[in-house]
Every structure is written in C-alpha cells, then in structure tokens.
C-alpha cells in the first residue's frame, strides 16, 4: 500500500510536458502569393495568428496584435519558439527588408520580399501544427483568399508601373533619375553644363514622349510628333520670356496648363502636376529667374 501511494505521489509531482507551440498552418505557395499580392499585410495576419497560438499554448498575457505589428522587434523570439535554424540571421534579414521601403526610387520594391525570411518559420509551424494544431489548417484557397488574390493581382501592376514609370509629380532636378538625365543629354535637350532645376513628364511608361523642365538657363518643352514620330523641342531663355499664362488645376487628377510667350509671336504650352504644389514651385522659380534676368539686362 505504501509503495502504491509513493508511486502515485511521484506521478503527481512529475512536471507536465511543455505545451507544443504551433501556428496557423498555411501552404507555402498560398503564404508567398498572398504576401506579395497584399504587399505584406498577409504576413502580419500570419504573425498575429502565430503569436495567438503561442499565447494559447503558454497561457500568457501577451498581445498578439502588438507583436505582429512590431515584428521587427518580436520576430526573433517567435523564431526561437518555433525552433527555426539561424533565428538571428533570419530576424536581421527581415529587419533589413522591412526598412528598405525608405530606399529611393523603385528600390523600395525590395521591401515586398519580407516574406522570404519568414518561410522557414512557416514550414516549422506547419510541422508543429501536424502534432498540435492550434487553429484550423489554411491550405485551401477559400473564397475570401481568392478575392484578396484577385484584387492584389489587379493592384500590383499599377504599383509597379507607378514605381518604375516617371514620377507623378514635379521633381527637383537633383532628384532626377540618372537614366532620365542621360536621355535629356543624349537627345540634346540639355546643353553641356546646363542644370535642371525642376522637371515633369506626362509620360506613363517613360519620359521620352513628352516633358518640360526649368533649368538655370531657361524653359524647355518637348513632345513627340504623332505623325512623324520625331522629337519636337521648344525653348526660351529667361531673358526672352515676355509673359507666362497659367491655368492652375482645380482637380487633383488634372494638370496645370502653362503657356509661355516669347518674341516674334513665339509661344509653346506644357503641363505641370499640381501634386504637392510642384507646379507652383516650378513657376515661382521661373518667375524669380525671369525677374533676375530682366534686372541684370536693365543694369547692363
């Protein structure tokens, strides 16, 4: 009898096994596709469900949503809980990809690949979920996932086009992309030593079809003739500009129209985007240089 009580007592005092930490199982293909098509939002959902599974398994009082939103800080503990190999390296890679959205130009697109360091974690959580699934598996493409994928497929080309195409606003000459500056120089739109102050193009895929810029010498407008397909150019130095007629945009999707008049009834028209007040900065610089040019000519 004593032996039996001792045996039962040992069993009662034996520590319970640690809870199995799993996550929301999802097929790798679905995870990658939805991460790309939602621009990383699906990754936050997966991280939230993963931390929710940790909370349930450990009985802790953590906030899963906060750990998902601040994944750059909390990814390393999650990787260690899932027993993923090289957790530090993966966490650092995720951090670098996450902050790459601040890179100039189209380089921000690198941030779309934050899902890559999470792939080992997804695979590890799928293996653990096979032993102790905390949530229903999500391998199939349900209606909601399919709708999100379709919408993402429609939006992704627009985002890529906006990143790889010409800027939608008037840009400072110092921010002009090198390939665009090279085009202006090779097309002889920009004289040697001439400095672009402000630039804008109405082109969708490239600046080659149409554009205008104010330089330290004057205003240049160019466009492609629809019949001959030749590049047409109009230019007036500041001291020859007699008048500038402006019709400011009253709608964010419309451009400001500018007509510049020169001697001998010469004139040409170009357009400027009102986005972030770029059209006004462009024209204020033109007026400042016109005034300075007139003052210098009168004193001479």
Image: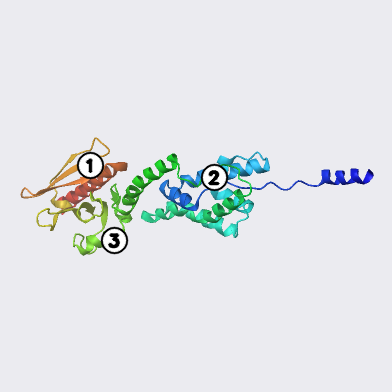
- Mark 2 and mark 1 lie on one chain; the one further toward the N terminus is 2
Q: CA distance from mark 3 to mark 2?
A: 48 Å
Provide the secondary structure element on which disc 1 rests: loop
Identify the mark at residue 179; answer none if there is no mark. Answer: 3
Identify the mark at residue 269; answer none if there is no mark. Answer: none
Going by the image, does 164 lie left or right of 12? left
Q: Residues within 10 Å of mark 2 (few under 14, many from 20)?
A: some
Going by the image, does 216 lie left or right of 24? left
Q: Residue furthest top?
A: 250
Residue linked to disc 1 = 255
The residue drawn where x is 73% and y is 48% is 17
Residue linked to disc 2 = 137
Residue 141 screen position, x and y as percent? 45, 45
Looking at the picture, tell me which residue is in the foreground, 282 or 178.
178
Provide the secondary structure element on which disc 3 rests: helix
Q: Quadrant of residue 134?
A: top right
Residue 232 screen position, x and y as percent? 13, 56
């Amino acid at each position: 009898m004593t032996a039996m009580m001792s045996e039962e007592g040992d069993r009662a005092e034996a520590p319970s096994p640690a809870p199995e930490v799993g996550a929301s199982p999802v097929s790798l293909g679905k995870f990658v596709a939805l991460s790309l098509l939602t621009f990383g939002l699906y990754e936050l959902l997966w991280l939230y469900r993963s931390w929710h599974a940790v909370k349930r398994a450990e009985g802790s009082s953590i906030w899963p949503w906060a750990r998902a939103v601040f994944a750059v800080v909390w990814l390393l503990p999650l990787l260690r809980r899932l027993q993923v190999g090289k957790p530090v390296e993966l966490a650092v890679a995720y951090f670098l990809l996450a902050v790459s959205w601040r890179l100039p130009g189209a380089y921000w697109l690198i941030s779309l690949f934050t899902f890559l360091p999470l792939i080992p974690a997804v695979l590890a959580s799928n293996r653990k979920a096979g032993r102790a699934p905390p949530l229903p598996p999500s391998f199939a493409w349900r209606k909601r996932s399919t709708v999100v994928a379709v919408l993402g497929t429609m939006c992704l080309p627009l985002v890529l086009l906006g990143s790889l195409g010409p800027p939608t606003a008037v840009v400072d000459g110092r921010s002009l992309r090198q390939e665009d500056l090279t085009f202006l120089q090779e097309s002889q739109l920009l004289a040697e030593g001439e400095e672009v102050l402000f630039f804008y193009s109405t082109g969708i895929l490239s600046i080659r079809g149409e554009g205008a810029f104010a330089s330290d010498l004057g205003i240049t407008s160019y466009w492609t003739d629809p019949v001959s397909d030749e590049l047409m150019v109009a230019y007036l130095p500041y001291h020859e500009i007699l008048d500038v007629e402006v019709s400011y945009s009253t709608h964010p999707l419309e451009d400001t129209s500018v007509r510049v008049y020169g001697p001998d009834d010469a004139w040409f028209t170009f357009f400027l985007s009102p986005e972030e007040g770029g059209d006004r900065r462009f024209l204020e610089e033109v007026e400042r240089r016109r005034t300075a040019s007139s003052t210098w000519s009168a004193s001479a």
